[in-house]
Structures are given as C-alpha cells and as structure tokens.
Image (cartoon, rainbow, N blue to C red):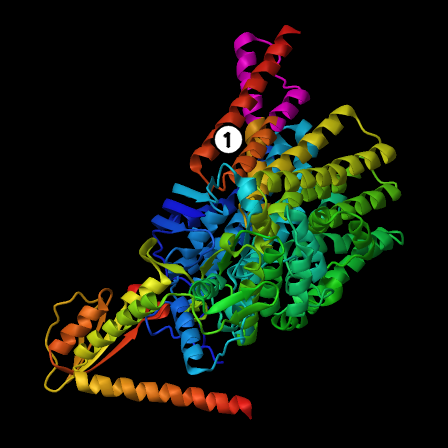
Amino acid sequence: MRWLVDYHSGVPIYLQLVQQVKAAVATGTLRSGDQVPSVRTLAEDLKLNRNTVSRAWSELETEGILENRQGSGCFVTSTVTPLRRAVRTERLAAAFDQVIVQAHHLQVDDEALRALLDERLRHFRKTRRDKAEGARE
Amino acid sequence: MIDVQGLVVRYPRGEAVKGLELRVEAGRCHALLGRNGAGKTSTLRALLGLLRPAGGSIRLFGLDVARHEAEVKSRLAWVPDAPAFQPWMTVAETLTWTAALRTKWNLDVQAHLLSRFELDLDAPTRELSKGQRTQLALVCALAADPELLVLDEPTSGLDPLVRRTFLEAVIGVFQDRDPQRKTILVSTHLISEFEGIVDGFTVMANGRAVLTTQADEARARFCRLRAWFDGDAPESVPMKTVRPPRREGRMLELVVDSAPDEARSWLAQAGAARVDATALTIEDIFLLAA
Amino acid sequence: MTPTLVAEQPVRAVAEFPTVGLWLLALIPANVVMLLDLQHGVVRPFAWLARFVPALLLLALVGWAQLRTGPTAIRLRRELRLSLGPAMMLLLGGGAALALDVLSGSGQALARAAAFMTAIIVPTAVVLLPMSAERERGTLLPLLASPLGARAFAEKFAVAALVIVVSWIQLSAAGDRGSELWWFALAGHALPLLTVPTWFFLLQNDGMTLGYVVVTPVLIAVPIALLGSSVAIGCVVVFGFAMLAGLPAAYRRGAAVGPPLWLQGDVPGLSGLERLAPPLLRAALHAQRPAVMISAAGVAGFVAIAAWGRDSAVAPLPLFIFSGCAAMLSPSLAFAEARRVGTLEAELVAQPRRQVFARRALLSGLTTAVLCVALPGALVAGVVGVTGPMVMAWCVAMLVLWSVGLAASVHQTSAGSALVAGFAVAGIAGVGQLGLCALAAWATASWVGGDPFVSRAFLAAALAGGAAVAFAVGCRRFLAADRFEPRIAVAAVTISLLHAAVLGMSSALVGHWT
C-alpha cells in the first residue's frame, strides 16, 4: 500500500492518513487481518511527527477499523463495526450533505449527481473484485 | 513547556529581538522561521542561556531559566548549526567528554545511533565531514536523553542522504519513549523538509513574531485560488487577501488567509468557469509572511 | 577584473583622526632617549635624528594611508588599525620601562623585566595579530587563494617590520651594545620578524604559534650553547633566516589543506599523562599545552644560564618572563581559545555557568600556580637562592598577570587579542596603582611628616588588590553573560585605585609611627 501525504490539500495530515486507510479498506487494498505499519516506521518513512501518526492510528482504533495487538502491531479489524446502524446512517448522511453542497457550488444537477454516484459505486465494486481475484492467483 | 514572554535581546549595534512571545506545549515540534537576521539565532541563544536577554522572561519546563539553571540545562540538548568539537579528540573521546558534562547518558541510544550513522570511533573530529559532524552532534544530543531538543539549522549544507538519516533519527530515536514529553524546537531554512514533522511554527521578521500558528490550521486557512472567467476577470474582490490579487486577462489569482470556502463560492457566483484551489504549504506561507 | 580586498567603505579622514592620532605617540620613545641623553649631559644631534627617522617614516606611512583612497591605501589603513594596539604597547612599553629605569634605581630589575617581556611577546603579537585577524574574520582562505594575497601579506609584514625597527632603535639605547641584555632584546625583536609568518601558515592557532615562536629558538640555543655562546647565537640566527627562506613554501602550503601532522602538538609524553585524567580534566589540560611549552622554555633558559655559571642576578630573568607569559596565556587558553573553537558554548549549554567558570578558572589557576610559581620557585631557590621580597614580588606578579588575563579573556574569541588586551591592562593598571600608591604615601608623609618610603609589602598588597578586582570583574562578566559595560570598568578602576591610595597612606602612617 502506498502512503501519500499532500501538503497542498489543506487537510490535516492525521486526517489524510485516516482517510487513506478508510479508502484502502473500502477498495479492498487493505483487508481484515492485514497489518498496517507501526507508528514509528510510518513516521520515519513519511518524515512525519510520530504524534501525528499516533493520533491517526488511535482515531482509527476508536472507529473500530484498526486494532492494536500488544507486541504484534496494528491490524485491520473485520469490517463489522460495533457502531449501531442508526449512527452509521447518520454519519453517512452528513457526508452526503457535504457532497450535495459541493455539487451545488460546482453546478452539478441532481440527475448528474445520481449518475455519478452509480458510476463511482460500480468502480469501487470492480476494484474490489479485481483485487480479490489477484489475491487468489 | 516553552514559555517566552516579551523577549528582548540587545546588541551594541541594535536590538535583535524586540518583544517576542512564544509558547510551545510539551510533545510538539515547533519551527522558528525567518530570514537571515530576523532574530532566530538570538532567540535560541537566549533560550539556551548563552546570552542574557535585556528584557522579558523565559520559562522552560515551567521553570525560570535563570533561577533553575542546572535543572533546565540537564533536560535540554542543542544541535548547533556549526557543531564544535576539540579537533584532536576522537569520536569516542568526544562522546566520553560530552557524557561527563551531562547528568544522564543513555549508552543504548549512543550505540544504536553510532551504528546507524556508521561513525568511526577512532577518527579524530578534525577529519570528519560536515555531515558526520552534524551526526556526531546529534548523537551527543540524543544520548543525553533530553526532553527538549533545540535544533539550529541542523540540515543546512548536508547531502540528501545525511539529511534523511538525520530526520529519521530525530523521529525514530528522540520520540521513541514517552513522545508526549519530547519537544522539538527547530530553526531552519529548509522548510519543506520539516513540513511533515512540524506541529506549529512562528515566522519572525525584524525581531518580532509576525505569524504564529499551528501547521494543520495554517494549511487549512491559507489558500491560493486561481479562477478562469469567460470574460475579463473581475477588477476587485470583496474578501481580505494576503496580497493584492493578480489579474492576467481571464485569470484571476488571489491568496486568502481565512474562509477559503467563501472565496470559492464568491468566485463561482462571479461567473468563474473553473476554479483551482490549492492550500499553501508552510514554505509558501513563510514566503508570504516574511 | 582584479579582485579587490576592500571590505569596508573608505572612512572620512577627519572622523578617524582620534584613533589614528595615537600613532603620534610613536614619537615618544625617541623623545625619551633624547631626554635620557640630555640628563646625562650628552648632546648628539645626529644620533637623535637617526632615532627619529624610523618613527617619522612610520608616521609618513600612516599619513599616506589616511590621505589616499586607492585600494592599497585602504588595505594599509586596515592593517594599521589592526596593528595599532600591539604597536603602541611595544613602543610605549619599552619607553616606559626606560623611563622607570632612569627615575627609580630600585625598580630597575622590575623595569628591565617588563621591558624584556614586551621585547619577546609583544613583537610576536605585532607581527601575528594582523595576520590572525584574517583567520578570525574567516577571510584567510579566500585571501590565500586570491592572486593579491601575497601582496597583502607582504604589506602586513612591512608595517610590522617598521614598528619593530622603531621599537628596537629606542630599546637599544638602553644597555650597552654587546651586553647580554642587548642581545636578548635583539633576539626578542628579530626572531618574531623572521619566524612568525612561517609558523603562522604552518600552525592552526595563535596559542601554538606563540608557543613555537618562543620555544624553538630556546630549544635550539640551549644544547648548542654548551659548545659556546657565540655558536649558539649563530645557530639561532641561521635558524631565523632559514625560517624566513621557508616562508614562500609555508605560504603555498597554508593555502592548501591544514598543517602537517607532526606540527599539531601531539607530544607523546604529555598525551600519556593526560590520558590518566578524567575526560573533562584531560580536555582542559590539553588546552593548556601552549602555556606548558612556554613555561618549559623558561625552565630550559634558566637551566642553561645557570649552567654557564653566569651572573646569578640575570639567570632568573628569562624564567620570570616566560612564567609571566604563561600566567597570562593560561586563562586565555581556558576561555578565549575555547570560545573560538566553540567548545565553551557546548559546555555552557549543558552545565550552569557557575560550574563551567569554576572548573575552568580553577584548572587554569592551578596550572599557573604549578608552572609559574611553584616550579620556577623551587628551581630558583635550589640553584640560585631566594629572598622573601623576591618570592613576594614573583607571586604577586603572577597573580596580577593571571587575574588580568582572566578578566581580559572571558569575552574574547581569540587568545591573541586576549593576550594583548591583558598585557596592556596589566601594564597600565600596575603602573597606575604603584604610582598612586607612591603618590599617596608621599602626600601623607608630607602632611604628617616622616619617610614617604612605601614598603614592598604594601606595594605587593596594592597589586594583589588590583588582581582581586580584576578577578571579580572577570567572574561577574562571565556569570552574567554580559557584554562590556562601561560602569563595571569605571567601578573596577575606582576601587583598585582607591585601594592603592589607601595602602600608600597606611604605609606612610606606619612609617611615621614606627
């Protein structure tokens, strides 16, 4: 998995790491049981403050995406999250709201937005399938 | 951890620092940026007790630097921009000598760093290259197990490999145990290198702090927007920009230091066909502020 | 385009007058010689004129450099400004010693010793400091690499040579031509001129240069002197000219990578001894090596003269001079040289200022006490025999030189400039205190009646008080990390002068009552 930090994006660095882990899990690049680099290794590789990486990792642990096994390292948990369905839907609704606002600013109408959503879902499914097939071979 | 109030440093030729305020919490990495002559070195020297400030107060670890000199000095370490060693001493002797000066000395850290940097223990220090001298200075600093690490232009003039190993050693070794209590204060010109490691920074100019902010916050606030219009770009913009907007025919470029979203929506409303927004890195912000 | 070596803007001649005007003091020695002659009733107009000529030449050079505005003139102005301090010390120090020689017969030994101390160290400083200033500014390597470098150094040398010739002419008026003291003064003037430039390009720092300049002729002369003193003198002369002949090679070498290994002061026996000590002590002892070398040279000189069975009054003189130099050098090695290398700051960041000062001052003090007081004292006592007043005078002199050296070097960044400042302050302050003491005694005696004679014990106490003030000033400046503050200097001068005056008065009163 390739880690990228973009200092031009305006997004806090720890958040970028969190988003990259989430995206990787969503696309299947990281599957449950995979090990993510330790805080020290990643910080040294990316020349980041260790506290930044630790913050990202602890946030992912709070959200239940990573788990820290003492002595072995940090691993991706199974994709079943302990959060209740209602909370999950509420969080997703907030993310959708942001997308809708942006679409309005970029003057993309509702139909185009739905088409775009379908297209992106198809893309993610395809990527996951390709990754799974690649792992089997 | 670091609390500087109203620091004034006076030299016979004038005042190098005119009322500086600096606060750094424990566990953070803070950068001191500024052009040559802005007062960075004088500030660091005052912090380290190498010169007596004409005014203001400096507190490190909650202790007054002048009154609790021994305690404060035993908890900090310094990597100067031109590390000085006795030219006739070998690397091993220099380490023994430095260890004799300090109250704590971690032999494991010393051994680990020596093997990592591949320094020859029997080489006299006068035969070391600049990169090796900086590495030796870092070993001397880190082996003393400090809580505050002060770096003064640590990587200037070094080749890229040495710069990388230096940073890796600072991240890997200094922040190893109890990283919440390990603070770094770095004064540097190679800002892009420290971009990821820095939590907050202060830009100094003419002896004063002109900008003090957290890195993430700054990157979110400062934004360079480029908009292309169908017709001519608008003459003026209602937002406060860091410097006057630049117009080139259909293109309008402006730099804002707050509420970039508002700027984007205004540009969209003003009829921009395309808006390109990039956040500014610390180096870009420094070039604007200093 | 020929590179210019000009670093500063040309300064208006009028604004610079106050400093440049000090060069007029170069005329004083020739005047003193004239007055000496007149006092003895001798009138030799041509000889006087001959003595004035070099001083006038020097002033003509100064004037030319002030009035012209070409690059050469600007370079010369800078050289003259750098040389002014040591040159004034040399010219006035010698002149003052001659004057003391005439005025008070009892101070003759002290005056002679002062004159000959200036005759060895100060000519070295006159030649060395303008060159070492380039090293301090960081312009040494660019100068060596530049095509004008040789010319610039030749100009520095010419200015130094002129000053030394002026000083020699006035000093040679004292002592009979061909006497030992005359030869000693000649050696002290000529050898630095012949050997300092070569040593400078071969060695790393001022301390080592000073050490080698002073020590090498002694080490050459002493064993050869067993064959005969004229042979020894001849060998030293040949050595001097050989060094001068080696100057171009040394210059070319100086422009390349560092000094040859064997000249870097790696003395086997000393290294072995040092290795026994704990690390901090070892580093501090290593730094004191130039002082050890100078002290060793003094011992060698004393042993040689004593072995020749010469006049026992003269034998301790070189030992006194070299011990005095070592006493002044020791604190400047501990503070100024360490600051120049950067290790003093490394220590100050790790330990409280008080601890660093105490360690360095104590070590320098102990080294000085052993090298400059105990060892020479034991030697002189064993070979020639000592008297109580002599011991007291020796101890007080070393104490004064050490304390003033400490005060002068706590904020300097080179041993060379610390030495010059130290000798200047010690000389002026010492003379001032002694003079004021005598004046106070005379005034008190003329008021209460009695003998105005100031006993040696009171004089020694006056100087010791001055030494204590100097130490306190040095201590305070270091601990407070203070730049030079005029009010501290004023307070120090006032206190030491008052102290001297009080002692003078007490001495007269004691003399009156007993």
Mark count: 1
Residue at mark 1: C492
Quarter location, residue C424: top right
Quadrant in which the C terminus of chain C appears: top right
Of residues B94 and B255, the one nearer the viewer is B255
Could you tell me which chain the residue with mark 1 belongs to? Answer: C
Secondary structure mostly seen in the magenta stretch? helix
Instruction: Using residue C282 as the reference point, say whether residue A25 is left or right of it.
Output: left
Indicate the amino acid at tag 1: Ala
Q: Which residue range is magenta in the image?
A: C435-464
- The relative height of residue A104 versus residue B17 in the rendered view (above or below) is below
Residue C216 belongs to the span the image colors magenta: no
Give coordinates of residue C376: x percent, y percent.
79, 38
Residue at 75% from the left image edge and 35% from the top image edge: C373
Quadrant in which the N terminus of chain C appears: bottom left
Residue B87 shows in this picture: no
Give coordinates of residue C338: x percent, y percent.
61, 51
Residue at 54% from the left image edge and 30% from the top image edge: C432
Farthest top residue? C513
Residue B9 shows in this picture: yes
Give coordinates of residue C395: x percent, y percent.
71, 31
Instruction: Using residue A57 as the reference point, say whether residue C314 is left or right of it.
Output: right
Of residues C25 and C378, the one nearer the viewer is C378
Tell me the element at label 1.
Answer: helix
Of residues C261 and B238, the one nearer the viewer is B238
Residue at 89% from the left image edge and 51% from the top image edge: C226
- The relative height of residue C197 versus residue B69 in the rendered view (above or below) is below
Give coordinates of residue A27: x percent, y percent.
42, 82
Quarter location, residue B110: bottom right
